[in-house]
Amino acid sequence: MLRALAGQLIQARRARAIERRIIRAVSPVPGAFAAPPTADSLAGLAPVALCRDGLAARKAATLVRLCKSIRLEELDRHDGDDVAARLERERGFGPWSVGVVFIEGLGRFDRGMVGDLGLVKLLSAMRGRFVEGWETQELLDPYGEWQGLASRYLLAGWGAGLLPVDTDEFRRLREDEPRLTAA
């Protein structure tokens, strides 16, 4: 849950730094190797304490609320559609966040990271036009119950240049992209 909220709309490096600060703040194990946080340990924090560690106020409030209202350690025992629907009812919690919770929190692969910026770039390059985040679901649909795993492998393959996609065409798209300028 922490990774899903910390990683929204920021650089991965910065998100991981926020996670590390929060984990160290609640971990009973001092030093370089901190114990993973529990829902109870995160629920015991005030949102302002999470903000001091770099988490945005709205995300901090959402994290504390979810940790208090949902038995997070038991989510893996419930139907995936029910879990996804419950999480998406939370403000600021969309398909990408649900995918992160499923893949990294629950160890399930039936939800992909829909809307991930890397997948948006990949699909844009494949289609020769810019795509919206929701369109990445179409990229993952053929993988069925393995959408989460496909998300990871597609991102890794795209990052390593292993996918047969015309990157020159993608560069041209970026160059032609209208830019907002200050008047």
Image (tube, rainbow, N blue to C red):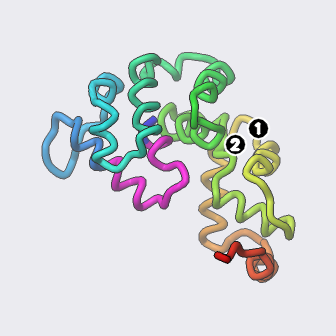
In the orientation shown, which residue stands out farthest toward the left?
30
Q: Does the magenta stretch include residue 75?
A: no
Question: Predominant secondary structure in magenta?
Answer: helix
Is 2 in front, or is 167?
Answer: 2
The boundaries of the magenta stretch are 3-19
Write the residue at 28% across / 46% down.
52
Q: In this view, does 137 lie to the left or right of 118?
A: right
Residue 83, given in percent of the width and then of the height, sits at 60, 22
Contact, mark 2 vs mark 1 (Cβ under 8 Å): yes
Where residue 159 sits, quadrant-wise, is bottom right
For the residue carrying disc 2, how many other residues have a C-alpha within 10 Å: few (<14), some (14-19), or many (20+)? many
Please count the marks in the image. Answer: 2
Q: Is mark 2 on a helix, strand or loop?
A: helix
Is 69 in front, or is 149?
Answer: 69
Where residue 165 sits, quadrant-wise, is bottom right
For the residue carrying disc 1, how many other residues have a C-alpha within 10 Å: few (<14), some (14-19), or many (20+)? few
Q: Is mark 1 on a helix, strand or loop?
A: helix
Is 62 in front, or is 103?
Answer: 62
In the figure, 171 relative to 6: above or below? below
In the figure, 177 relative to 101: above or below? below
Is 101 in front, or is 50?
Answer: 50
Q: Is residue 179 left or right of residue 107?
A: right
Residue 140, given in percent of the width and then of the height, sits at 76, 47
Residue 84, given in percent of the width and then of the height, sits at 63, 27
Check disc 1 and give the amino acid type.
Answer: Gly
Check disc 2 and give the amino acid type.
Answer: Gln
In the orientation shown, which residue stands out farthest toward the front?
183
- The residue wearing badge 1 is 144
Q: In this view, does 51 lie to the left or right of 150?
A: left
Write the residue at 64% across / 24% down.
80
- The residue wearing badge 2 is 147
- Whole-angstrom CA distance, mark 2 to mark 1, is 6 Å
